[in-house]
């Protein structure tokens, strides 16, 4: 894809991109995009962001509405953390305004992938994005794994080729996923405007798992692995860490909490 092709008819490209954004944010979960289309549309949006600060909103609105309806409820869910690798190095090598655009584009694209896989976008934390998946306990694990795989594919095949044309470094991510019960909390008495968030073991362990991941590695907790379809389980192998590296224990058995790596 060349810059000239993208600029040849900006109104048409913007219309197409907006239609895809509408699909990504749609509540109709029957609408899906194939991976090639997602990659192409990602490239268009990243091009636009680098040139004129293209942005789209609404990615956390559905999560906010869902959480407000379930304040103080305990919910079973799969939590996914995706964190950008090397952003500190980027700040030393690139203009601040470009770093801001790249991190913003990364965050928005990762959020769009979460929505496309029937998850909710909880929040953006620095250069990390947190999502969660609720519903059928078996399906949510599969959805989260598919989401994680799509994230890496979007970065490698969609975002990085565009950045390379500007001589910017490749982006890489670390992804951690866990399952468990979290409680919806509201900070304040204002039902409509007070901040809402999630708290619980799954949030904490997913963050710890993500922190242990290597660049472009997907790690999942045992509680997620046990809920995956057998065809998905075969793509994972157990990670072996020393007791010093990994000290967390299962919330049900008291034994060391196993973590699995996606091998594909």
Image (cartoon, grey):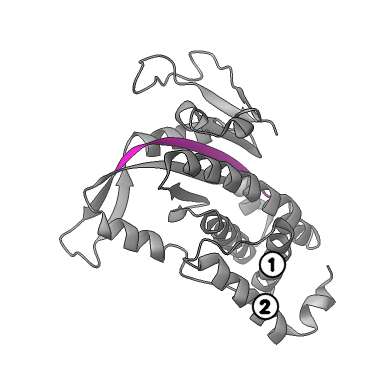
The rendered magenta stretch, by its main secondary structure, is classed as strand
In percent of width and height, residue 115 lies at 51, 58
Provide the residue designation for mark 2. Answer: 16
Q: Which mark is residue 41?
A: 1
Q: Check residue 173 for magenta coloring.
A: yes
Q: Is residue 84 visible?
A: no
Q: Residue at x 49, y 28 (%)?
A: 226
How far is disc 1 from disc 2 in space, using C-alphas?
8 Å
Side (left or right) of 10 relative to 196: right
Kindly indicate the quadrant of the structure image that contains residue 159. bottom right
Count of labels in the image: 2
- Badge 2: how crowded within 10 Å, few (<14), some, or many (20+)? some
Question: Is 194 located above or below residue 240 in the figure?
Answer: below
Question: Is 41 located above or below residue 120 in the figure?
Answer: below
- Badge 1: how crowded within 10 Å, few (<14), some, or many (20+)? some
Q: Residue at x 46, y 69 (%)?
A: 58
Q: Are marks 1 and 2 in contact (CB under 8 Å)?
A: yes
For the record, the magenta segment spans: 171-182
In percent of width and height, residue 36 lies at 74, 59
Question: From the image, which quarter does the C terminus lie in?
Answer: top right
Q: Residue at x 38, y 59 (%)?
A: 63
């Amino acid at each position: 894809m060349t810059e000239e092709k993208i600029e040849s008819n900006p109104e048409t490209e913007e219309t197409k991109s907006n239609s895809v954004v509408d699909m990504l944010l749609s509540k109709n979960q029957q609408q899906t995009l194939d991976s090639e289309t997602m990659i192409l549309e990602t490239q268009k949006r990243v091009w636009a962001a680098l040139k004129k600060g293209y942005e789209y909103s609404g990615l956390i609105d559905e999560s906010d509405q869902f959480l407000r309806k379930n304040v103080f409820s305990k919910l079973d869910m799969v939590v996914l953390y995706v964190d950008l690798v090397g952003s500190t190095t980027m700040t030393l090598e690139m203009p601040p305004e470009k770093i801001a655009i790249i991190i913003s584009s990364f965050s928005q694209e990762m959020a769009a992938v979460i929505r496309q896989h029937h998850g909710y976008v909880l929040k953006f934390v620095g250069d990390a994005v947190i999502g969660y998946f609720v519903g059928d306990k078996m399906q949510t694990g599969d959805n989260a794994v598919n989401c994680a795989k799509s994230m890496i594919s979007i970065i490698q095949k969609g975002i990085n080729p565009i950045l390379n044309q500007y001589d910017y470094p490749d982006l890489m991510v670390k992804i951690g996923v866990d399952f468990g019960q979290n409680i919806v909390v509201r900070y304040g008495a204002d039902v409509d405007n007070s901040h809402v968030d999630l708290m619980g073991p799954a949030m904490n362990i997913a963050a710890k798992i993500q922190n242990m991941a290597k660049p472009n590695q997907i790690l999942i907790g045992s509680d997620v692995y046990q809920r995956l379809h057998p065809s998905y389980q075969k793509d994972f192998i157990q990670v072996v860490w020393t007791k010093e590296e990994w000290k967390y224990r299962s919330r049900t058995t008291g034994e060391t909490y196993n973590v699995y790596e996606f091998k594909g």
